[in-house]
Amino acid sequence: MPRTRGASASTPKGLNAFDGMRGIWDSTAMTSTQGLVDGLDAVVTRRFAASGVAWWRQTLERLTGADPGGLAEAFTAASRKVGRQPLALTADERHALTRLGMAEAMIDRSTTDEAARIALLLAVAVGKDGLDLERLVDDVYQSGDNSERQAVLRALALLPEPERFVTLAAEACRSHVQPLFEAIACENPYPAAHFPELNFNQMVIKALFTGVPLARVIGLAARITPELVRMANDYASERTAAGRSVPPDIALITSAGGHRP
C-alpha cells in the first residue's frame, strides 16, 4: 500500500513539500512499482485543489485495498476531480520521476489527470499479478474514453512484466484515433522496448504517413533494421511517384543504410 495512506489533505504523509522525494529516490524501492506510485503521489497532490486532494486520498485508499473494483470509475472521475492542467514540473520533480523510471519526454506532455490515472493504475498493480492484472488493464482500456485509454497506454512501460501487454499496445497502433496512436507511438518507451520487429516497423511507417515527427518515437535509432530501411525507402518511392512530398525526417531511417543489427 502507498506510504502516503492516512496523510493530511494538504501534504502526503512523510513528505514536507517536495523534500520527501529525495528519500524516495534514495530508497531500495526506487525502481519499484510502489516507488512510482509514491513519486507520482507526491507530485500530483501538490497540484490539486483541496477538493481534489480529498477525493484522491479516498480513492487511493480504496483502490489499494482488497477490492480495486472501482478503478474504471476513478479513471472516469479523474479529469473532473483533479483537472487537466499541464504538470509543469520543477527541476527536482522531473529528476525524481525520471530516476523512478518515467521517460522525460512523457513527463513533459503529462497533465494532472493523466498522471493521476497512471498512479492509480500502478497502485492497483502493486497488489495484482498474472492474469488478474492483465484483465484489469484490458478492462479499464476497453471501457474508457480516449483520454482514459491514453493514460493506460502511457502506463504500460511502468507496469510489472510489461511485455504481457504487447497485444493491447499493438491494437492501439492500429487505431484511427490519432491521439491514441500517438499515446503509444510518441514519447513512450514501450514500443522500442517490447514490440516485435514487424509491429515496430509498421508503427514507424504509420507515424510517417500520419505526419508524426520521428523524433517523437523513443528508441527509434536502436530499432532501425534493414527491413525498416527498405519499408521507408518504398514509402518514399510511392510518395514521389504520386507527386507527393516525402517527410524530410525519413532520413533518420534511410540514412542509416540498414547497417544496424
Image (cartoon, helix red, strand yellow):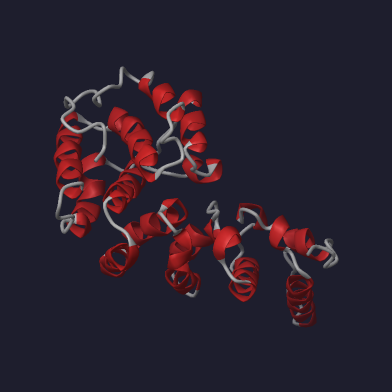
Residues 142 and 33: in front is 33
Q: Is residue 31 above or below residue 68?
A: above
Nearer to the camera, 132 or 106: 132
- How many discs appear? 0
Rendered location of residue 36, percent (x, y): 39, 40
- Residue 205's place in the image compared with 33, above or below, is below
| Residue 199 sits in quarter | bottom right
Expressed as whole percent of the image width and height from the top left, the position of residue 248 reads 76, 60
Q: Quadrant of the C terminus?
A: bottom right
The residue located at (49%, 72%) in the rendering is: 170
Left or right: 131 in relation to 181: left
Q: As displayed, is residue 68 above or below residue 257?
A: above
Q: Is residue 175 visible?
A: no
Residue 6, can we see it? yes
Tell me what residue is drawn at x 43 percent, y 66 percent.
165
Q: Is residue 213 left or right of residue 172?
A: right
Q: In the displayed structure, does residue 5 sit left or right of residue 203?
A: left
Which residue is painted at 48% across and 69% down in the image? 166
Figure quadrant of residue 201: bottom right
Give the position of the N terminus as an image quadrant: top left
Direction front: furthest residue: 28
Residue 230 image offset from top left, x and y in percent: 78, 76
Locate residue 200 relative to residue 82 in the image: left or right: right
x and y percentages locating residue 37 in the rendered image:
34, 40
Q: Is residue 31 above or below residue 227?
A: above
